[in-house]
Structure formats: structure tokens, C-alpha cells
Image: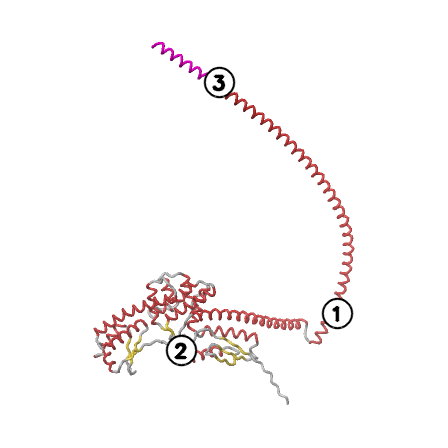
Amino acid sequence: MGEVLLTALLVGGGAFAAGFFVQQYLIRQKTEKAQHDAANILQEAQNKQKEILLEAKEEALKLKDKSEQEAIRLRQEASDEQKRLHQKEESLDKRYESIEQKLLQVENTKKQAETINLKLEEEQKEMTQRLEQVAHMTSDEAKEELLSRVEKDIKEDALRLIREVETATKEEADRKAREIIAIALQRCATEHTAEITVSSVPLPNDEMKGRIIGREGRNIRALEKATGVDFIVDDTPETIVISSFDPVRREVARMALTTLIADGRIHPARIEEVVAKAEKDIEKVIMEAGQAAAVAAKVPGLQTDVIRYLGMLRFRFSYGQNVLDHSVEAATLAALIAAEMGADVQLVRKAALLHDIGKSIDHKTEGSHVQIGADLLKKLGFSERVIYAVQAHHEDVPLKTPEDFIVLVADAISGARPGARYDTVERYVERLQKLEEIVNSMPGVAKSYAIQAGREIRILVNPDEVDDLAAKKLAMDAAKRIEEGLEYPGQIKVNVLRETRAVEYAK
């Protein structure tokens, strides 16, 4: 057992010694290899250093040669420049001598000119004195006369130029405006006004008047109390007139009375029932009319209150033109004009549709329908641009944007187009007379004539009192007075005529 253990120890020790020597041998081999590699790297570095030094020396030699050549070139250029400067100096000396000679000549010429000017002044004085003696006026008076004539000629030329420019500009503007408006009207279907403000209800017979009045007037009192309108029963056969400033109440009364006449049962209890039903029916009609108007004008998203105010315009008329139909027509025209001009189409649609919304409650509120409408739109939360366009459609505020002008024009076209409104003969004649009175009151006017249904006024002036310049000013002043003193649809052309006649008799 002991021998085996000893043998094992010897074998293990030998193996350990053999492994140790092998390891030392490998380490020595790696060390020698590393030293060899290091020597190679060092040698390569030394070789690289020599190459860099050689290249640097070559580059330095090249730079030296280049700098020497550049110095030679600069010295040559400097020499050439010096020669040129020397030549210029010689040339300048020659020119200086020449200029001195010319100055002497100029001085001599100046002296001669002064002598001649003195002679001319003396001759001019003599000529002026002779002219004054011939013309019987001094030179200052002649100068004033000449300036006066020149000023008159300049004014006439300026006036003629202004007229030419105004005529050309107006013709071009009128042509473009007619083109835009014609396109808009062609694309907008319009109707002639056939409906007027009707406040009378036909009766089947005159006996119905007594039934409507009732015993001791209890039925008609009940009707007036329930509807808030006045029922006028007069000698007009088979007709009862309804009077009220509120068009909606008047329509409720008309519907209720028509229903009572058709039903035949007329007593206070039945009247209250029928009026209540008519109010519900009219509210439905109002909302339907407002919604239909918004759809026709292509203005979606309006609030319920706005729809209701619009619908109330269904029962409002202006010169026989239904205000709701007029608003829809104005919105359509405004959108077409805006599309042609490149303006904000949706803005003008909305502003034109709502421009007369104040008329729906103007019988309840003090103020113009423009201001009432603007205040109403502010409460309803509309934008400032829409509200301003509504305020500007009758020029209550200055027109600022193209959209403001478009809404104003669309409103005017819808109200002034043929068939849009009706007018009585008395009002028509009164307007023509007022137009002539305004013009005849102006100084220099001999006579005036309103023609073309009041759309043109021709003014005959006294030619001795009004010259061409004054005629132009008279036309402008007359137009301004007409704008301030007369209400009219569309526009009125002011035409001033001045005629001078020379009459002589041969005897």
C-alpha cells in the first residue's frame, strides 16, 4: 500500500514538473515573438519617418521656388505700373495746359456774353416801354392777364382730362358691375311682387257681421282681447278689416276669424279655443318658413331663435315686397356677386339673409330696424363681421370690406329690380315733384325735368351764370342734395345741360 502511494506521488510530481517546464517554454516563445514584432514595428516607424521627412523637404523646395517666381512677377508688375503712372503724369500735364487755355477762352467768352446781355436788357426795356405804350397797360398788368388766361386754359385742360378719366373709369366700372350683376341675376330666379299687405277678411254675407259682433259686442270684444288686434266693421260690404302693427298677431287674427266664419260657431269660449289653436298653427308656420328660408339661402346651422325671427318676416311686407322673400333673394344675389368678385361667399350669405331681421320685432322696440337687428344678432352670438355688414347695409356705419358693399348692393338690387315693389301713383308723383324742387332751388338752374320714372334728372342752366367748370360742380352738388333730401331705390342720374346761342339778324 505504501509503495503504491509513493509511486503515485512520484508520478504526480513528475507530471507537475513536466507541465511547469512546458508552460515556461510557451511563455518564452510568446515573449520572443512579441519582441520580434516590436522590432518590426519600430523599423516600420523609422522608415515612415524618413519618408515624411523627404516629402516635407520636397514640398519646402517647391514652395520656395513658387515664392521666388511670385516675387519676380510682382516686381515686374510694379515696374510696369510705375511706367504707366509716369505716362499718365505726362498726359495729365498736357491736359492741364489745355484746360488752362480753354478757361482763358471761356473767360473771354463770358465777358462778351455779359456785354451782349447788357445790350439785350436795354433793348428789352425799350421794347417793354413801347409795348406798354401800344397796349396801354403796364408789364405787371400784362403779366396778370397772361397768368389769368394760362390759369383758365390749365383749368379747362384739367377739367377735360378729369372728365375723360372719370368717363373711362366709370364706363369700365359700369361695364364690370353690369357684367357681375347680370351674371348674378341670370343665376337667381326672381318673382314679381303680387302679394301686398292684406288686412281684410271676406265674409259670405253681411249678416255674418252681426254674428261676429255678437250681443252687445261681446264676440268682437272677445276677439280683440284674445288676438290683441283691432277689428274694424264698417260699411264696406262683406268685409271686416283687421288693424295691427304686429303682422304675426294680425295673421293669427285672420286665421282665427276665417276658421270661425267657416265653422259658424261664434261665441267667447269658442273664440278663445280657435285663437289658441291659430297661435299654435302660426308658430309652426313661422318655424317652417324660417327653416325653408335658411335652406333656400344655403345658410345652415342657425339657432332655433334665429329661425323663429326669420320666420316672423314671412308676415312682414315692405312696399308690397315680402321681407323674408327679399332676404332670401338678397342672400342669393350676394353669394353670386361674392363668387364673381372672390369675396367671402358664406359671410355675405349669412349677413344678407339676416340684414332685415330687425323688422321682425321693430313694432315692439324703438329704433331703426338696422340697429334693432344688430342688437338682436349680438345677443344671439353672431360674429362682429356679420353684425357690421348688417349695420352697413343702409350705411349707418362706414363701409369697410368688400363684403359690406356686396350686402348693400344685393339689398338694393333685390329692392329696386323691376317687379320687386309697388308704389302708389301719389307717392310716385310726390317723389318726382320733390326731385325737381330740390334741383330748382339751386342757383343757376333755369329748369329741370325728372325723366325715366325718376331715375334721371335733366337740369337746364343759364349759360351766362354757369360756365363749364360750374356745370360740373353743379352736377356734383345736385347729386349730393338729392342723396340727402330724398329716399329712392337704385340711383338717379344727374345730367346738366348748358347751351349758348348766338343770334343776329341781317337787315
What kind of residue is marked 3?
Answer: Tyr
* Outermost top residue: 3
Provide residue 383's location: percent of width, then percent of height.
39, 61
Q: On the rendered structure, is 199 left or right of 13?
A: left
Tell me residue 421's x, y (percent). 40, 75
Membership of 423 in magenta stretch: no
Q: Secondary structure at mark 2?
A: loop
Q: Residue at x 58, y 25 (%)?
A: 43
Whichever of labels 1 and 3 marks the residue nearer the N terminus, that label is 3
Of tags 2 and 1, which is closer to the observer? 2
Q: Which residue is mark 1?
A: 123
Quadrant placement of the C terminus = bottom right
**Residue 397 in the image, given as x and y percentages of width and height:** 43, 66
Q: Quadrant of residue 347?
A: bottom left
Q: Tag 2: residue type?
A: Asp
Percent position (x, y) of residue 27? 48, 20
The alpha-carbon separation of the residues under discs 1 and 3 comes to 137 Å
Start-end of magenta stretch: 1-26
User: Is 402 drawn above or below residue 245 in the view shown?
Assistant: above
The amino acid at mark 1 is Glu
Q: Find disc 3 in the rendering and name its residue.
A: 25
Which residue is drawn at the image coordinates 56% and 74% (left, top)?
469
**Separation (CA) of disc 2 from disc 1:** 79 Å
Q: Residue at x 74, y 44 (%)?
A: 80
Foreground label between 3 and 2: 3
Instruction: Indicate which disc, 3 or 2, sits on the residue closer to the N terminus.
Output: 3
Q: CA distance from mark 3 to mark 2?
A: 133 Å
Q: Residues within 10 Å of mark 1 (few under 14, many from 20)?
A: few
